[in-house]
Image (cartoon, grey):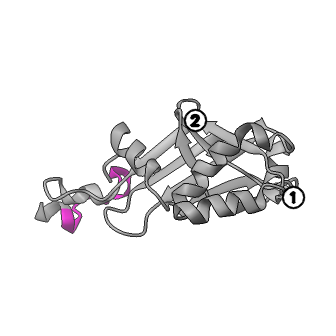
Amino acid sequence: MPKLEDAERDAFLAERGVIMHIATVASDGAPLVTPIWFIFEEGRIWFTPRQHSEWLQNIRNDDRVALSIDESATPYRKVVVRGRARIDFEIGDDDVWRERYRRIAHRYLPADGANGYVDSTDDQPRALCSMALAEAELRSWRMPGEAERPEGIWANRYWTRNAKIVDRA
């Protein structure tokens, strides 16, 4: 599949309503995947675990994470990131970064709903975490467009010799 250009990737990461799945490593080595809200700003993906989130404890114990952000409609854009999460603000520092959280909520809820949600849950402590794309391993792709070769639907390594789709191109 064609890789997203940086501008395409950044536009996709800025779209409203796109959910991210974060994979963390539990203390017993098992993976934990959690769907969460996020925002892409300043070259970083920002996210906010609640104080009792299992995945926050996992990040404290092992900061290696994987992020999966995708859409279920064409062109099926996907961004997968592996790297180390940073806890930018620990529990109890919420007032310092609350406006960023408000911007996150606005990506998923109408303005009144987002403000009401943030204002009615501001007594529930959260941490603020992030991952810099420049410091992570990043893969992205999308379906090939009309002018692109149809075998671009998969990475080259997946095709066997003499594939039907390649012969039709």
Q: Position of residue 151 (x, y in %)?
A: 24, 58
Kindly identify the amino acid type of the residue bearing the numbered disc 1. His
User: In 3D space, how far apart are the residues under numbered discs 1 and 2 (Cα atoms)?
Assistant: 26 Å
Q: Position of residue 69 (x, y in %)?
A: 51, 56
Most foreground residue, 51 or 95 = 95
Most foreground residue, 39 or 152 = 39
Q: Secondary structure at mark 2?
A: loop
Residue visible at 43% across and 64% down?
71
Query: Residue lying farthest top?
Result: 134
- Choose the circle earlier in sequence order: 1 or 2: 1
Kindly identify the amino acid type of the residue bearing the numbered disc 2. Ala
Report the number of discs: 2
**Which quarter shows the C terminus?**
bottom left
- Residue under numbered circle 2: 136
Tag shown at residue 12: none
**74 with respect to 34 (left or right):** left
- Corner quadrant of residue 85: top right
38 within the magenta span: no
Q: Position of residue 167 (x, y in %)?
A: 14, 62
Q: Judge whether 156 appears above or below 36 on screen.
A: above
Tag shown at residue 52: 1
Of labels 1 and 2, the one closer to you: 1
Q: Position of residue 100 (x, y in %)?
A: 63, 43
Tell me the crowding category of disc 1: few under 14, some 14 to 19, or many 20 or more residues within 10 angstroms, Cα based.
few
159 within the magenta span: yes
Tell me the crowding category of disc 2: few under 14, some 14 to 19, or many 20 or more residues within 10 angstroms, Cα based.
some
**41 with respect to 153 (left or right):** right
**Which quarter shows the N terminus?**
bottom left
Residue visible at 58% across and 49% down?
103
Magenta region: 155-165
